[in-house]
Image: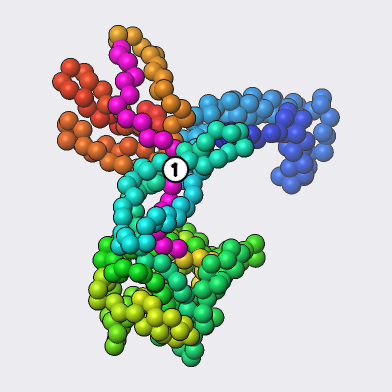
Amino acid sequence: MPLEAPNLDDRQYSDIVAEAKTLIARYAPEWTNYNESDPGITLVELFSWLSEILIYRINEVPDLNYIKFLQLLGIELQTAQPAAAELTFIPARPDLVSTIIPIQTQISATSDAGTPLLFETDESLVVIGAILAAVQTFDGFGYTVQTEKNGNAGQWFHPFGQNPKPGSALMLGFRSSVAFPQDQIKLAVTIFTSSTGRPVIQCAGALVPPATLAWEYWNGSLWVTINIDEDGTRAFSQDGHILFPGPGNDVVTAALGNVSEKLYWIRARIEQTTYEIAPEIAAIRTNTISATQATTFTDEVLGGTDGTPNQTFQVTNTPVMHLDSPLTAVNAYGKKVTISSVRLEIDQGQGFNVWQEVDDFFS
C-alpha cells in the first residue's frame, strides 16, 4: 500500500484559542477577563489565526519531502514483492552421484486462474543422489531418532536437545547406491516458529552466532572435520542454507546411535554455546533451493530519444521487481554501478554504458 503522509497537526482555530485561554491562568493569573472585547483576547485570536494558517501550510508540504524526511530516519518505502518458494529437486536416476540445476531454471506452478505461474531459481544448485535417510540427535547422554519429525509438516525437534551443551550433536545419515558425492552439499534448514514463540535471532545483521559448531563426517574409526563454506542459519538460529563440500569416498557407512541401518554420517557438534533458547528445527532438506516468481528478460530495446524533455519509455514486461540482493557492474568510466531493479545501458555514440538508477535528484 502507498505511504500516506501524516497530518502533523490537526488543530483548528477554535482548538488553539481554547488551548491559549487555559494557559492564561498559569502565566497571568491577574488576567480574568476572557471576553472577546478584551484586547488580550483579540491578540490570542490573532495568534490562533496565524497559527492555523501555518499549520495548514506545514501539512501541505509535498509528499516527496515527507518521504525524504522518513528516509533520514531509516524508514523506507517497501515495494511489492514477488512470491518466493523453496524448491526441492529429486534425481530422476538413482545411479547419478550428482547433477547441476543452473541458475534461472524455470519451474511452473498451477494457479486458480488456470495460467501457470513461472518461478526461477535464484542460484545454481548441485543435486546429489544421496538421500537423507535418518536424522538423530545426541544431547550428551543419549540418542534420539528424529527422522519422522523431520519428514512431517507441523512437527519439530531440538537439534541438540532441550539443554544444548558442548558435545551435543545433530547427526544426519545418508543412503546412497553409488559413491558419496564430493560436490558441494546444500542443506536447507527451516526453523520452527509458532504464534507464542520467537526466533533466537530476530534481526539480520553481522551478529555473532550463539554457538560454535564443528561439522564432521564418520570415516569408520573417528570423526573428521569438514570445512563449512557457508552457514546461513547462524548455528540453527534462523532459516537458511548450509553449504559444505562432500567428503566423497572418505566417508564410510556405519550403524551409529539408535539407527541400525548402515548409512553415511555427517554431524554438527557443539564446541561452545551461548544459546539462550534451545533451537527448534521444523525440517532439514537436501537438494533444496530458493526460487522467485519472476522471469528474466535480456537485450530489450527501449527506443531512442530526440532530445526533448520528459520522454518516457515503457518496458515490454511489467511489473519490474526490486532485487533483494543488488548486483554491481562497472561502467565505461570505471565507476561501480549498483543495479537494484533494471540494468539500463545507453549508447550516446561511444558504445553502451551502464547507468546508475537513483530514487530522485535531491542529493
**In this rendering, position of residue 128 left or right of residue 285:** left
**In this rendering, position of residue 23 left or right of residue 115:** right
Say if residue 274 shows up in the picture: no
Front residue of this view, candidates 114 and 333? 114
Figure colour scheme = rainbow
Q: Quadrant of the C terminus?
A: top left
Q: Is residue 6 above or below residue 137?
A: above
Q: Quadrant of the N terminus?
A: top right
Q: Quadrant of residue 231?
A: bottom left
Dominant SS of magenta comes to loop
Front residue of this view, candidates 278 and 149? 149
Read off the residue under disc 1.
107
Under tag 1, what secondary structure? strand
Q: Within the magenta stretch, is there residue 55?
A: no
Q: Within the magenta stretch, is there residue 292?
A: yes
The x, y position of residue 226, in whole percent, is: 28, 73
Count of marks overlaid on the render: 1
Please name the residue shown 63% across and 26% down the image.
Answer: 56
Front residue of this view, candidates 17 and 67? 67
Say if residue 117 shows up in the picture: yes
Please name the residue shown 73% across and 28% down the image.
Answer: 13
The residue stretch that appears in magenta: 285-305
Please name the residue shown 58% across and 25% down the image.
Answer: 60
For the residue marked with disc 1, what is the amino acid?
Ile
The x, y position of residue 179, in whole percent, is: 28, 69
Please name the residue shown 69% across and 25% down the image.
Answer: 49
Circle 1: is it few (<14), some (14-19), or many (20+) Cα within 10 Å? some
